Image (spheres, rainbow, N blue to C red):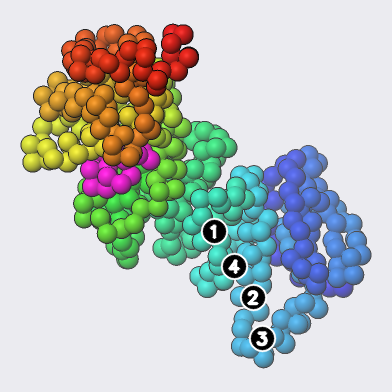
Amino acid sequence: FFFFLFCLRLIYSSCLFRIRMIDNNSPWLYWSDFQVAPNFELLCNIFDIERKVATATIPASSQVIVIEEQSLRKSMAILNRMTGTSITNTRNTEILEHLIREVKDESSLHFAVTIVKDLNTQLAPFESDISDASIDITSKLDQLDATREQVYQALFVCTLWKEWDMRQWLSAKQFFVVISTLSKEKLAKQLCLSIQEILTHNLSVFDDDNGIASRDNMEKGLCCAFDKFMLIPCFNYLALSKRMTQQKEFVQNINFEADKLWTIDEKVLEEVIALDLRLRTAESPPDIFIENYLVILLQCCPQYTELTVQLLLDKANKNIKNQELTRILQLIWTKDEEDKKNEKTSLTWNILHFLLKDKKKRAYWIELLANSSIISDHNLFLKLLQDSLQGWLHGTEEKKGDAKNVPFHSKVIELVSSDTFAKAKSYHQCLIESVDERSRELWLTNKKWTSEEIGK
């Protein structure tokens, strides 16, 4: 058999890589046999169409990567005459497809990128070659459950886009999926420089004004407010590398009000918030606090209040002052926006309403009663807390059918047995008045008492 050799300057020493055959009719060097030894010699096995093996030792100064059988080239030539396609283009596409398939992780990505850069002159692929080879690769990132392998393959495609100046980028959601996957594997500062560069390059296409994704003034694509919201944890992750130089103006002018017609996927919203909270540590506060934008989102889209509050409660720590939900309420009431009084009242009431639904959530609500000054001393906020306590004691929530029916005497026990409520002195009078009005319900003759409650 005769072989056609493409060139590559091997720059690795003592490295091991793996490559598989494209198909049964196309012989390739096995990447596992592609090793540069300390003596600067390359030992490789060549597999032909009949699976026969020839062993050869090649000096590292030689240039070799892919071996293609001449008979296959003849088949391509025949196909070329019949279809008018280019042998070179077909070859380029096959090589790129093969490299994409072999990218599994950071190491194989780095090697594949080196191959492409070193073979730039020899391959000289057209944009169509890259597009044909990478079809459906980045679209797999439209799903939140994209695999680690799919993420690294997409990053390789992004590298091709960048190297050939194709002016193509990942969408905001695809970029988020990449960051979410990488963050589970390693810290941002542990990413190799080439990956950081391709990520910051992709992030740079999102314009800092009016929610538009800028593409070097050549093309602009619509980037809705929620797209920019998705980029907040991405920016926070990359900022942890300490190499991030891009400013954070790209999240300015997030206008959820203008984007009310856009549908927000609740699962995506949940993943965005969860990622941002997961990245937080006491030593590394976020560059951009997502709570600032959550407030705006919830005021415009109150239907996501319960989902958001539950996520924040799941992340809650023992100190109410440092909890994200506390910060949300602070942001609502520290801004003096009289024209948005109705939105602030409605959002706060929705949050309190959700907290009253079960005992576990009410623990935070009781914390608010005892520490209301941490949030705000605004009279309207204090009245909302008072109303929520009175409404709960009077059974308003149960009447709406939104909360579990808790007997009045059980509510009294829950409050008086709480060390935290003991500190909420400004609300004790409300409880006393309710007890005076419904004292008969506290008699032990009330059949609603359980043996466990009597034992207390």
The amino acid beneath tag 4 is Ala
Residue 172 place in picture, x, y as percent? 40, 53
Chief secondary structure of the magenta portion: helix
Name of the residue lying farthest toward the bottom: 82
Residue drawn at x 79%, y 42% as measured from the top left: 37
Residue drawn at x 23%, y 38% as measured from the top left: 347
The amino acid beneath tag 3 is Asn
Q: In this view, does 221 lie to the left or right of 341?
A: right
Q: Do the residues labelled 2 and 4 touch (CB within 8 Å)?
A: no
Label 3 and label 1: CA atoms lie apart by: 31 Å
Please give the residue where the numbered disc 3 appears in the rendered image: 80
Please give the residue where the numbered disc 1 appears in the rendered image: 140
Report if residue 305 lies within the magenta region: yes
Residue drawn at x 30%, y 58% as measured from the top left: 262
Compare marks 4 and 3 and give the one earlier in the sequence: 3
Q: In this view, does 359 lie above or below 269?
A: above
Label 2 and label 1: CA atoms lie apart by: 24 Å
Please give the residue where the numbered disc 2 appears in the rendered image: 90
Please give the residue where the numbered disc 4 appears in the rendered image: 133
Q: What element carries label 3?
A: helix
Tell me where the magenta segment starts and ends, as one range: 291-309
Q: Is residue 62 above or below residue 78?
A: above
The answer to whether one can see residue 111 in this image is no
Q: What element carries label 4?
A: helix
| Viewer-proximal residue among 117 and 130 | 130
Query: Mark 2 Cα within 10 Å, few/some/many (few <14, many 20+)?
Result: some
The amino acid beneath tag 2 is Thr
Q: Are marks 2 and 1 in contact (CB under 8 Å)?
A: no
